[in-house]
Image: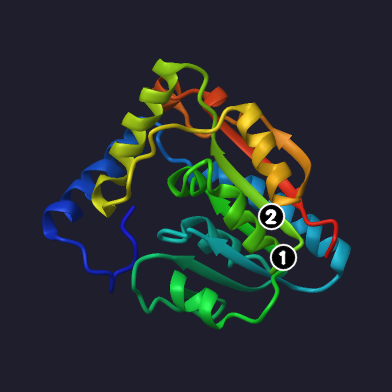
Amino acid sequence: MSRFENTKIPITKKLFIFISDLIRKIFGGDRIKRLSQIMIKISKNIYMKKRKKITILDFGCGSMQISKRLEKLFFIKEIVGVDTFKSKFKTKKMKYIQYDDFFKNNKRKFDLIISIDVLHHIGIDKSHIILKKLSKISKNIIIKDHFEHSYFSRQLLRFVDFYANYGYDIAIPKRYFDYNSWKKTINKSNLKQIKIIKSFQQHDGLFNLILNKKHHFISLLKNVKR
C-alpha cells in the first residue's frame, strides 16, 4: 500500500506497490481486516473503562490503513500517526507527524499506542529502548510483530519483508524475535505483558500458506507504574 498521495515515491516503485497490492488482494494477502478487528476490540475495551472518547498513537503508521478504520468508530477522538517519511496528511480525526518532529515537540499522553510490524525493523536488541520511550506517553501499548522458529523461518520472513517493503526503502532485519527474546525485551522495557496471542492468522489463501500464523504474534503491554 502506498503511503499518502502527497508522499514522493519514484514512478517505478509506485508501479511495484500497485502490482504488489493487486497480488495481495487476489491471493489472500490483505492483513488489514483481521488486524483491524483486534485493534477495534482492544480500543473499545479501553473506551468502556474510561467512559470517554480515546486518543491513539499509531507508531510506525505507514499508510495508516488500520487507523483509517479505527477513525470511523464513534469512541475515537483522535489518531496521530508517526513514521520516518515526510507528509502533510490530515483528516478531521487523524493527522500525521514525522518521527523527529513528534518526539522533539510532543508533550501529550495517549490512551493507546498501536505499533504494527515495526519493532523488528528497529532491531530486536534495540526495541526495548523505543518501548520505554513509548511507555512514557501511554499506559497501553499493542505490538504486532513476527516470531522466527528456525534459520529457514528467518529467511522466509526476510523474503516476505523484502517483498512488502521494497517500494519504501525500509531496511530488512537480519533476525526476528523468538518467544524468549521477546520476553527479554519486555523485561528490559519495564512493561508488563497483559496478554499475548502467540499464533495470529494474519492472512488467508496463498499468503497464509507461505507465512502461516505461527510467524505472527500480538502482545498487549501495560505500564503499570503510570
Q: Please give the name of the residue rendered at 61% of the width and 49% of the height, measured from the top-left corner.
A: 128
Q: Please give the name of the residue rendered at 64% of the width and 41% of the height, measured from the top-left corner.
A: 185
Q: Position of residue 187 (x, y in %)?
A: 73, 42
Residue that mark 2 sits on: 141
Vertical arrangement, residue 21 with respect to residue 48, above or below: above
Snapshot quadrant of residue 90: bottom left
Image color mode? rainbow
Provide the secondary structure element on which disc 2 rests.
strand
Front position in the image: 211 or 120: 120
Q: Whole-Å distance between the Cαs marked 2 and 1? A: 7 Å
Provide the secondary structure element on which disc 1 rests.
loop
Q: Are marks 2 and 1 in contact (CB under 8 Å)?
A: yes
Vertical arrangement, residue 11 with respect to residue 157, above or below: below
Total marks in image:
2
**Outermost residue toward the left?**
12
User: In screen coordinates, is 15 left or right of 75?
Assistant: left
Q: Position of residue 74 (x, y in %)?
A: 69, 70
Q: Amino acid at mark 1?
A: Ser
Residue 138 — which label?
1
Few, some or many residues within 10 Å of mark 2 (<14, 14–19, 20+)? many
Q: Please state, as top left, top right, bottom left or bottom right, where the C terminus lies in the image.
A: bottom right
Q: Amino acid at mark 2?
A: Ile
Vertical arrangement, residue 45 with respect to residue 19, above or below: below
User: In screen coordinates, is 99 left or right of 182?
Assistant: left
Q: Please give the name of the residue rendered at 40% of the width and 29% of the height, measured from the top-left corner.
A: 157
Does any portion of residue 98 appear in the rendered image?
no
Does any portion of residue 28 appear in the rendered image?
yes
Vertical arrangement, residue 151 with respect to residue 220, above or below: above
Front position in the image: 11 or 143: 143
Q: Please give the name of the residue rendered at 50% of the width and 25% of the height, measured from the top-left corner.
A: 148
